Every structure is written in structure tokens, then in C-alpha cells.
Amino acid sequence: MRFIIVPGLDGSDQNHWQSAWESGWLPNATRISPASWTHPDRDDWIAAISNAIALSDEPAVLIAHSLGCHAVAHWLTTVGSPTVRGAFLVAPPDPLAPTFPVDLLPTFTNLRATSLPVPALLIASDNDPYCTVDAATRLAADWEVPLITTGSHGHLNSDSNLGPWPYGQDLLTSFLAGLGIGFGIGLGTGLRSG
């Protein structure tokens, strides 16, 4: 099993839970490499996801944060791959909210939200400045995926000071178990106590 990390705008820095998961918790994890981290271009991000998937025909799970959730949803519904088993979507911004930077993200506006073709889980914070719980509920309904709220943790990013985010690890572990995917020995050691 491979894990493809899909960060949001500007990528995920060293203090982000995605970076902690990639470097020490998840086995066989890689990060997409678009050329447009700072001024995201949808087609560039879609190609980056496709490139990461194409590196192996081993089954994969996509782990996305923020804008990466919209890139993953768009990729799944327009490109897709039979090797992708599921998507773990954390804190997508609401593209209809006034906080959505339309001028910075013109190719990510007006994306059609439709049912995702693989099992997925949407995780949202109760006080995300970029997506209210009502908006997250709407996105979950459009994508036809379950929604779990985490309490008040902001945008679930580096500023949220989640460290390796043990609760997120538990959510991903449960999600994967529902897909019939086990981690194997050694996963969850080291970082969980930090």
C-alpha cells in the first residue's frame, strides 16, 4: 500500500501533520510535486497527482489537506485510477466563502462537486476560518462521503499545533480498516507519543 500526500497552498511545512506522517508514521508515503505550490494551477496539480500514482501499480490512498482536497476530488472524478483505494480529505476550504482567494486560485474556482468514485472521509474543524461546518457538510453531501468534525482546531494545519496529530492517525487507521487495509507492524510507533 502506498500513501500519496497532497498538501494545500504552499505545501506543508515541517511542522505540519502531513510532513510528520510522511517522514515517520506512514510507510511508503510520497508527496506530490507540482510546479505551482504558491500560485496553484489545477492542471499542474492534477498532473502531479497522476505522476505520483503512475510511479507504481501498487494500491494507493490519497491523503489531502486544504486545497489538496479539491485537487484530489477533481482528479478522482476526471482522471482517476483503479489503483486508488480511497481518499482521506482534511479541511477543504469552501470555494463559495469570501475567504476563498479567487484571485490566487482562479483555476480552482467553479469546480463541479460530484460523487467521488472511491471511498473517502472528510475531516473538518468546528472553527476553520476557511470552511464552516455547514460548508463542510455541503461538500461532504456533494462528494457523498462521511463527515467527521474534530472540535475547534482551526484549519488543521501547522498553526493548529497538532504535531503528528494522533487523533488524525486514529481516524486514518479506522478509515483504512474499513477498506480492509491493515498497516502492519511498527506503524504508529515513535511519533504518536510525541
Image (cartoon, grey):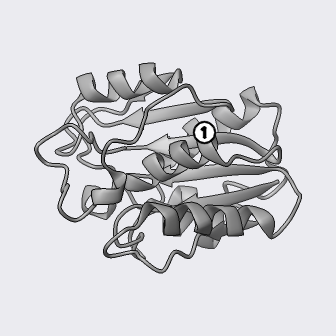
Q: Position of residue 63 (x, y in %)?
A: 57, 51
Circle 1 packing at 10 Å, graded few (<14), some (14-19), many (20+), is some
On the question of residue 97 being in view, the answer is yes
Q: Secondary structure at mark 1?
A: helix
Front in this rendered view, residue 18 or 162: 18
Q: Residue furthest bottom?
A: 35
Residue drawn where x is 30% and y is 37% of the image: 125
Residue named by callout 1 = 77
Q: Is residue 123 above or below residue 16?
A: above
Quadrant in the picture for residue 36: bottom left
Front in this rendered view, residue 43 or 30: 43
Residue 129 as seen in the image, left or right of residue 106 = left
Residue 127 as seen in the image, left or right of residue 46 = left
Tell me which amino acid carries mark 1: Thr
Q: Is residue 95 above or below residue 104?
A: above
Q: Position of residue 27 (x, y in %)?
A: 75, 63
Q: Residue furthest left?
A: 98
Q: Position of residue 149 (x, y in %)?
A: 36, 28
Quadrant in the picture for residue 118: top right
Residue drawn where x is 68% and y is 62% of the image: 50
Q: How many marks?
A: 1
Front in this rendered view, residue 97 or 89: 97
Q: Position of residue 154 (x, y in %)?
A: 23, 46
On the question of residue 161 being in view, the answer is no
Q: Is residue 191 above or below residue 154?
A: below
Residue drawn where x is 82% and y is 43% of the image: 82
